[in-house]
Each structure stands twice: as structure tokens, then as C-alpha cells.
């Protein structure tokens, strides 16, 4: 086997992705003959047939399919390296985009960020956003955020995260809201005729998921948990709220928990998350280290379970 070049691998990958040499030539802005010659040379150097040219359209051989999987990893690493080089050439980032999700205690999230951006005062602007439900993930995966404070699917290999603790969500009602006696076995059937207040998902393109929603129940939607809390306190609806926000009202009796067998509540694993498959500049790296150092003491609220 003879050495092969990155350009040959790029031509091969383009042929596979575009389904032919002509499409690959257009994408790469090269001539059909040049792309054909590059792939032929790659096969000659490898001494392996990567493409089956016997049909109307070229297809991958078994060896070609295996080689292409490895080639995609190489090309992805190459793009990451290019991005990292551009980041290094730029020096410190001009701004960092951070999203606070609706599951993050706002005061604690702001305190965490302010301790970095205003105590150490880097020459980097904080571009801060608030998003709900799938909004933080959407921004992160569309490269519209560098960091999110929210919960994530930890099985996603594109992500790395720092655990910040667990946030409990409790189903609650105002004292006179229920038309029946409160017990620990309130059922979805009993709640189906009552208005449920839910948070509006700020994600635009992701598939909408209904968390803790009783199907068929009348709904009112709000933009954040503060508004949701006010709606529930006024007896206009019921819904799930983070315990750190309502502990005082639960103690005073201004809100009642309907948690039980059918509405057990839920614990959310709050994290700081970023893309593992993207380069991060020097300020983003220092912010990540700052969050790692602060994570064990994140939040002063006794009703948030620490890491």
C-alpha cells in the first residue's frame, strides 16, 4: 500500500455523499476528470476497490463502506482542527453565548456567571439568553450557544457536562382549586377536566415533547415558571413547579402538593453542558474550569440536591 492524500479522501467522500462524480465535482468546485482521477489514485494506492462502477450509479463495495466510515471520522477531526486553528488565530473570544434553561434556578445561574464575567472581567462579552424545554438544546446543536445550564440527554456522545445537582418538580394547586378532596391518589382522570398550566417550548424545529401533561385536559401556556407560579397561586390552573421556587408557599399552605401514586413529581439532573465535538477558545475553557470548581457549592438553596 502506498501513501494517500487528504485531498483524495475528500474526493472519495464527496462522491459517496453526492452519489456520483459529477455531483462531487460541483460540490468541490473541481472538474469531473480531476475527481475521477483522485479516487482512482486512492484506490490504486490502497490496492482496494472502493467503488463499484458496474451499474448506472456508482456504489460502495464492502471495503469501500468500511473505509468510508473511518474516512468520515478523519474528515470530521480535520474540520475540528481547522476550527480550532481559527479560534487560536483570533485570540480571546469577543463574546460567549450562554443559555439558561427553565430548569436552572435563575439566581444561582446568574451568580455562577457573574462570578466569572464580572469578578475576573475577561475582555469577552456575555451574550445571555433564556430558553425553555428544548430551546437550550436547539441553540447548542445549531451552534447558536457555547454553553447551556439545563438538563441534557447524557447518552448523547456530542455532549460533555458538569453536574450541578438535582431540581425537584412538584405538581401543585391552590387551596380551593380542586372540586374534590385532596388525597395522595389523585388520578389523571380527576385532573383531566381541570386547566393545566404548562411552559411554552421555545424550541423552533425540534420535535415537541409533552412533559407531565395530562392528555385531553384544557391548557393555558406561559413563558416561564414565575408566570406559571402566579397563575397557579391565583387558582387559574394547576401544574408542576420547581420546589426551590415554591417551598415557602408549600410551608404556608398557599400551595398544596398533589404528588402521589399517579403524579409522583420528577427530579431533573441540572448540568452545565457544551459540545464535545466543537473547539473551545481560551475564555470558554476558563469558564468551564470555573464551573467545575464551583459545581460542588452551586446554589445556596437547601431544596436543591447538590452534586
Image (tube, rainbow, N blue to C red):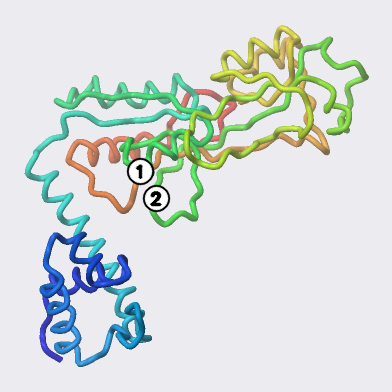
Q: Which residue is located at x 11 percent, y 50 percent?
A: 85
The location of residue 132, given as percent across then percent down, is 51, 29
Q: Which residue is located at x 69 percent, y 28 percent?
A: 170
- Using residue 240 as the reference point, say whether residue 260 is left or right of it: right
Q: Which residue is located at x 57 percent, y 15 percent?
A: 226
Q: Say if mark 2 contacts mark 1, CB within 8 Å.
A: yes
Say which residue label 2 marks.
159
Instruction: Find the residue positioned furthest to the left.
Output: 89
Q: State the image quarter where residue 2 is shown.
A: bottom left
Q: State the image quarter where residue 42 is shown.
A: bottom left
Instruction: Name the element at disc 1.
Output: strand
| Nearest to the observer: residue 40 or residue 250 | 40
| Nearest to the observer: residue 122 or residue 292 | 122
Instruction: Find the residue positioned furthest to the front.
Output: 56
Q: State the image quarter where residue 255 is shown.
A: top right
| Nearest to the observer: residue 174 or residue 306 | 174
Residue 274, numbered label: 1
The location of residue 210, given as percent across then percent down, is 65, 36
Graded by Cα atoms within 10 Å as few (under 14), some (14 to 19) or many (20 or more), the crowding at tag 2 reads some
Image quadrant holding the N terminus, namely: bottom left
- Using residue 125 as the reference point, say whether residue 113 is left or right of it: right
Badge 2 or badge 1: first in the primary sequence: 2
Amino acid at each position: 500500500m502506498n501513501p494517500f492524500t487528504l485531498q483524495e479522501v475528500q474526493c472519495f467522500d464527496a462522491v459517496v455523499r453526492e452519489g456520483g462524480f459529477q455531483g462531487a465535482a460541483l460540490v468541490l468546485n473541481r472538474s469531473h476528470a480531476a475527481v475521477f482521477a483522485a479516487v482512482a489514485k486512492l484506490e490504486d494506492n490502497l490496492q482496494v476497490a472502493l467503488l463499484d462502477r458496474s451499474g448506472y450509479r456508482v456504489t460502495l463495495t464492502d471495503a469501500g463502506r468500511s473505509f468510508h466510515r473511518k474516512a468520515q471520522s478523519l474528515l470530521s477531526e480535520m474540520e475540528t482542527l481547522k476550527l480550532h486553528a481559527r479560534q487560536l488565530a483570533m485570540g480571546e473570544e469577543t463574546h460567549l453565548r450562554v443559555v439558561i434553561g427553565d430548569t436552572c434556578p435563575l439566581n444561582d445561574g446568574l451568580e455562577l456567571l457573574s462570578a466569572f464575567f464580572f469578578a475576573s472581567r475577561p475582555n469577552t462579552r456575555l451574550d445571555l439568553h433564556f430558553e425553555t424545554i428544548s430551546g437550550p438544546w436547539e441553540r447548542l446543536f445549531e451552534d447558536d450557544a457555547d454553553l447551556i445550564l439545563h438538563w441534557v440527554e447524557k447518552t448523547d456522545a456530542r455532549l460533555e457536562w458538569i453536574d450541578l445537582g438535582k431540581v425537584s418538580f412538584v405538581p401543585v394547586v391552590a387551596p380551593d382549586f380542586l372540586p374534590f378532596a385532596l388525597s395522595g391518589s389523585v388520578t389523571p382522570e380527576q385532573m383531566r377536566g381541570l386547566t393545566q398550566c404548562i411552559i411554552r417550548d421555545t424550541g423552533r424545529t425540534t420535535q415537541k415533547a409533552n412533559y407531565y401533561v395530562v392528555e385531553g385536559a384544557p391548557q393555558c401556556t406561559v413563558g416561564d415558571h414565575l408566570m406559571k407560579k402566579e397563575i397557579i397561586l391565583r387558582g387559574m390552573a394547576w401544574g408542576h413547579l420547581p420546589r426551590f421556587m415554591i417551598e415557602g408557599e408549600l410551608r404556608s399552605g398557599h400551595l398544596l402538593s398533589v404528588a402521589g401514586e399517579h403524579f409522583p413529581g420528577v427530579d431533573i439532573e441540572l448540568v452545565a453542558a457544551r459540545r464535545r465535538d466543537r473547539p473551545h477558545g481560551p475564555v470558554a475553557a476558563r469558564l468551564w474550569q470555573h464551573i467545575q470548581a464551583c459545581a460542588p457549592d452551586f446554589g445556596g438553596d437547601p431544596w436543591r440536591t447538590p452534586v
